[in-house]
Image: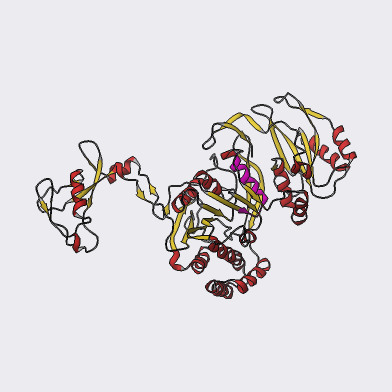
Amino acid sequence: MNRLFFGDNLGWLRDPKEFPDASVDLVYLDPPFNSNADYNVLFREASGEASQAQFHAFTDTWSWADAAETYNQFIDTCPNLAVTEMMQAFHSFLKNSPMMAYLAMMAPRLVELHRVLRPTGSLYLHCDPTASHFLKLMLDGVFGADRFLNEIVWKRTFAHGNVGRNYGSITDKIFWYSKGATYCWNQPFIQLSDEEITEKYPNVDPNGRRWQSVSLRNPGLRPNLHYAFTASNGITYQPHPNGWSCNLERLQKYDSEGRLHFPSKPGGALRLKMFADESPGERLQNIWEDIPPIGAQAAERLGYPTQKPVALLERIITASTNPGDVVLDPFGGCGTTVHAAQKTGRQWIGIDVTYLAINLIKRRLRDAFGEELQFEEKGQPTDFASAQRLAELDKFQFQHWALSLIDARPLKEGDGKGADRGVDGLLYFYESKEERRKVIVQVKGGGVKRNDVATLLGDVNNQKAAGGILLTLEKPTKPMRDEAADSGRYESKLWHEKDYPKIQILTIEGLLSGKERVEAPPQMNPFAKAQREGRPEQQRKLI
């Protein structure tokens, strides 16, 4: 069963009931890079263009004050002595630096990821040069240096025009390790262009088939493949001193199928015809330049700051797993890994510590594969008590989660000034092809009172919104409901079959139980259609 976890991945990974030993076939992780930067989600407007509205996704900065306890606990309990000694060596060199804090975060997670991998499983770690040298050593310690298979270089962006006194940095690294000596491997191939085929296969048979001439010499010394061969043209050919590359039966089969290239000069070497139409392409090497970055106008683009192309994850997943295998992404982000796993017929597990990411993943899966896609959600509030706990622990995560209950888009974080003050999220609906209107949403995790309704109504009028929704953890009072009812209603020019309350009060408990729902025009865009992967054209819902 596919699963989506909300919360700290280390806590989940250490739960043996959720993640038993040897239960996963592939781990792909694209963790923070210790870049010392803030990353924002950039949303789309109705036109498909990028909006100026941004929301903070995560901060890639690490503090030793936050990591010291994790480091000390890890040193005391880690079962891998090599990793323990390596971490102590790192600490003696890096001291209590942000880099050491970052490594203290990564080490226990890599140990747990190694534990949950099956003996035939693989791990791909995506990073950049900021910490790649330390991560490579750490992976050597966790997996063993003999389990390192490749350092893949992916060209993640186009050439930079603003490079100053250095070379443009346009690549990421992906380290590939296997857990055991025997691992799943489905050889990927790169398809050649017509020009490349013409260059690589310069010869053409009378029937029009292109071919190239390849050696029949054995690369090593093979006395058992040392024999004279009389071909169909009546000439007897002698092998190279190393011997033929195949036995007599295979060579005779090549001859009967017209696959031998006879030399034009006496004494020349007999060779083999390799036909272009029988070649799957060129074997993929470890420099990947054929998967372009996600452009600003790409349909795939979701606005998540570290989003990777689906094609990149499809390549990794199909190369190192088989259909039905389990793929785990412990830093789920915007869900590219789980999207690619679902698309290629694998089972998947995604984890992320922010509900902004979890909600984005759910929307993405729903848009790509439909409402009927089934997966299990864990770590998220399912009743009033757990919602209350989330509100007490983290008001921002509670806010993101609450907005997702009504499919509202979170508003950008600001400094508390200007027109967006007090507004946490938005719902949009269309009035015409050129016009859409908004319903503003305020989330209250604490006490609510009558003047909250008046404040929301004022915001609705000031922003010329169609209506407003007060989403509250606590039950509203009768005066609050009366105030909302007295605010009036609005009509939609396009969706004119009914009118809608200008101010609505919805409770978390009511939404969870299904007793309450939003009264507003549909968010569907009736003027634009999107082709869904593997599904008929359907109307696109705004993100």
The span shown in magenta is: 351-366
Instruction: Tell me residue 117's x, y (percent).
Output: 52, 60
In the visual, does 149 lie left or right of 327? left
Query: Nearest the camera: 157 or 390?
Result: 390
Residue 508 visible, this angle: yes
Quarter of the figure with residue 76: bottom right
Foreground residue among 97 and 137: 137
| Residue 67 is a magenta residue | no
Horizontal and vertical percent for residue 369? 56, 39
On screen, residue 510 above or below 176: above
Q: Examine the rendered structure and indicate whether residue 144 appears above or below residue 328.
A: below
Check the image and tell me how it is coloured.
secondary structure
- Coordinates of residue 23 in the picture (x, y in percent): 54, 58
Q: Quadrant of residue 193?
A: top left
Dividing the picture into quarters, in which one does residue 540 lie?
top right
> Is 196 or 506 nearer to us in this picture?
506
**In the image shown, does 358 or 463 lie closer to the viewer?**
358
Q: Is residue 242 visible?
A: no
Q: Does the magenta stretch mainly form a helix, a strand or a loop? A: helix
- Placement of the C terminus among the 4 image quadrants: top right
Q: Is residue 358 magenta?
A: yes
Residue at the (49%, 45%) spot, across then down = 344
Report whether 16 appears left or right of 118. Answer: right
Q: How many numbered circles does the render carry?
A: 0
Furthest residue in direction right, as rendered: 479
Q: Which residue is drawn at the image coordinates 18% and 49% (left, top)?
A: 252
